[in-house]
Image (cartoon, rainbow, N blue to C red):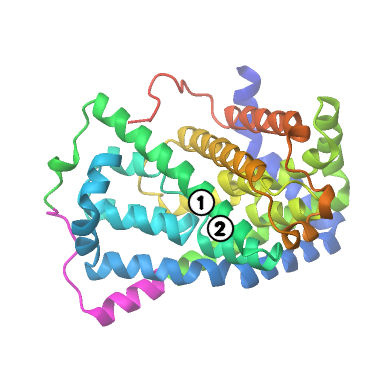
């Protein structure tokens, strides 16, 4: 306990010192990482996320969420035990990508349309890789097979829905306010014109993209510098000692750090396609820092949030694993992943299990809290 407190106290100094040393001794690797981060952001993230961020903000600012709520309110109430106004946030989180759900929840909470308990619970399942990233960027562009991207996206949606339904059941057991006890929007935003809504939405989208780009660049810099400096090899050697295979050990740090880089590594390592579900299901710290930035005024318990990211990764990966056992993608998908030798069987299952265990250990070291005392932090 004492060692943990000391490490936490001096962690800012240690992190800044390590960052400075990387910049001083490996400037070329840092510059290359920055360029890679900018490339990934411009080619993949901005085209796939920016339109959805603007759309989600516009729906909330313009009041269109009321009409979406009326259409899908029975589903939202029955499945998730949430007010009708949450329908648009849930839908947009599933089709818009990682930051979109957080942005919708933030707007709903700031307007007084949902309670703190509902906001915290929504952020356990309104976090998902969107179709633009999985179907277009991963399926069509990276794997040259749209069908695989669709399957990967379906597994993500399935996992989020399972978590949403389970948390809804838990909220009923604990007798938290139901959808029928919806708030009266006393603090809701004043009605604004369509033009103003468009301008506000564009401003929100630009701000989110700038923050997202900065974080992706920083993590890309760190990953590339660690790789060139040999620091990553130390972690890989440790993982190999505890029984994790060479291919699996190479992707642990990218999966924990940043989802786009993780997908690149998975592709280059000729791993089974369901590993993409593992990377997309967890999301990476880079994505979660973006979400924490959006939700800075909502007291989200980060350890609980990260635990459910891991649960989401496990459920989506298991679903993808089972699906690809029953269905063999066409040759185009596997031509990128190393040809027929790319496995979809259970021969690497133990390595994957060890990978998940290591991610669990990592999450438990983030913050020492009594997770079992209040499972959902409500």
Left or right: 199 as drawn, with respect to 291: left
Which residue is under mark 1? 154
Asked if the stretch drawn in magenta spans residue 190, the answer is yes
Point out the image quarter for the C terminus.
top left
Res 13 label: none
Q: Is residue 236 visible?
A: yes
Is disc 2 surrounded by few (<14), some (14 to 19) or many (20+) residues within 10 Å?
Answer: some
What is the secondary structure assignment of the residue under circle 2? helix
Asked if the stretch drawn in magenta spans residue 133, the answer is no
Which residue is under mark 2? 150
* Residue beneath the point at 53% across and 65% down: 132
* Residue beneath the point at 83% across and 55% down: 339
Left or right: 27 as drawn, with respect to 151: right
Q: Is residue 229 above or below residue 239?
A: below
Left or right: 301 as drawn, with respect to 57: right
Point out the image quarter for the N terminus.
top right
| Residues in magenta, as a range | 185-204
Task: Determine the image quadrant of residue 78.
Answer: top left
> Mark 1 to mark 2: distance in Å?
6 Å
Q: In the depicted view, which residue is nearer to us: 157 or 307?
A: 157
Is there a contact, CB below 8 Å, between mark 1 and mark 2? yes
Q: Return the x and y of residue 373 as percentages of the image width and height.
A: 40, 19
- In the current view of this chain or complex, which residue is farthest to the bottom? 195
Q: In the depicted view, which residue is nearer to us: 31 or 262?
A: 262
Q: Is residue 338 visible?
A: no
Is disc 1 surrounded by few (<14), some (14 to 19) or many (20+) residues within 10 Å?
Answer: many
Q: Return the x and y of residue 71 as percentages of the image width and height.
A: 21, 58
Q: In the depicted view, which residue is nearer to us: 50 or 87?
A: 87
What is the secondary structure assignment of the residue under circle 1? helix
Task: Determine the image quadrant of residue 92.
Answer: bottom left
* Residue beneath the point at 69% across and 70% down: 39
Q: Return the x and y of residue 153 as percentages of the image width and height.
A: 53, 54
């Amino acid at each position: 306990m004492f060692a943990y407190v000391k490490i936490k106290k001096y962690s800012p100094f240690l992190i800044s010192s390590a960052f400075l040393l990387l910049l001083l001794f490996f400037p070329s690797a840092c510059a290359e990482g920055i360029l890679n981060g900018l490339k990934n952001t411009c080619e993949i993230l901005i085209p796939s996320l920016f339109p959805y961020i603007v759309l989600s903000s516009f729906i909330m600012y313009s009041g269109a969420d009321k009409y979406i709520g009326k259409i899908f309110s029975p589903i939202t109430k029955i499945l998730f035990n949430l007010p009708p106004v949450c329908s648009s946030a849930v839908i947009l989180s599933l089709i818009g990508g990682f930051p979109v759900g957080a942005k919708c929840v933030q707007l709903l909470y700031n307007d007084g349309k949902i309670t703190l308990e509902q906001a915290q619970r929504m952020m356990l399942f309104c976090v998902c890789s969107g179709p633009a990233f999985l179907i277009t960027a991963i399926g069509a562009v990276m794997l040259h097979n749209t069908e695989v991207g669709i399957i990967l996206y379906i597994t993500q949606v399935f996992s989020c829905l399972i978590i949403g339904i389970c948390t809804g059941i838990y909220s009923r057991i604990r007798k938290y306010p139901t959808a029928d006890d919806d708030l009266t929007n006393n603090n809701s935003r004043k009605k604004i014109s369509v033009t103003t809504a468009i301008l506000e939405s564009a401003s929100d989208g630009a701000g989110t993209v700038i923050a997202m780009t900065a974080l992706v660049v920083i993590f890309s810099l760190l990953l590339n510098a660690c790789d060139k400096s040999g620091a990553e090899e130390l972690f890989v050697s440790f993982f190999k000692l505890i029984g994790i295979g060479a291919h699996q050990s190479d992707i642990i740090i990218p999966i924990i750090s940043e989802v786009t880089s993780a997908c690149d590594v998975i592709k280059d390592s000729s791993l089974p396609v369901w590993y993409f579900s593992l990377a997309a299901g967890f999301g990476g710290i880079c994505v979660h820092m973006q979400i924490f930035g959006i939700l800075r005024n909502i007291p989200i318990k980060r350890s609980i949030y990260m635990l459910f990211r891991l649960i989401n990764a496990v459920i989506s990966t298991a679903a993808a694993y089972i699906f690809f056992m029953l269905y063999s993608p066409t040759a185009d998908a596997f031509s990128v992943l190393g040809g027929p030798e790319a496995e979809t069987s259970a021969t690497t299952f133990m390595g994957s299990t060890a990978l998940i265990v290591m991610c669990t250990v990592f999450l438990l070291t983030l913050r020492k809290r009594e997770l079992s005392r209040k499972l959902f932090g409500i």
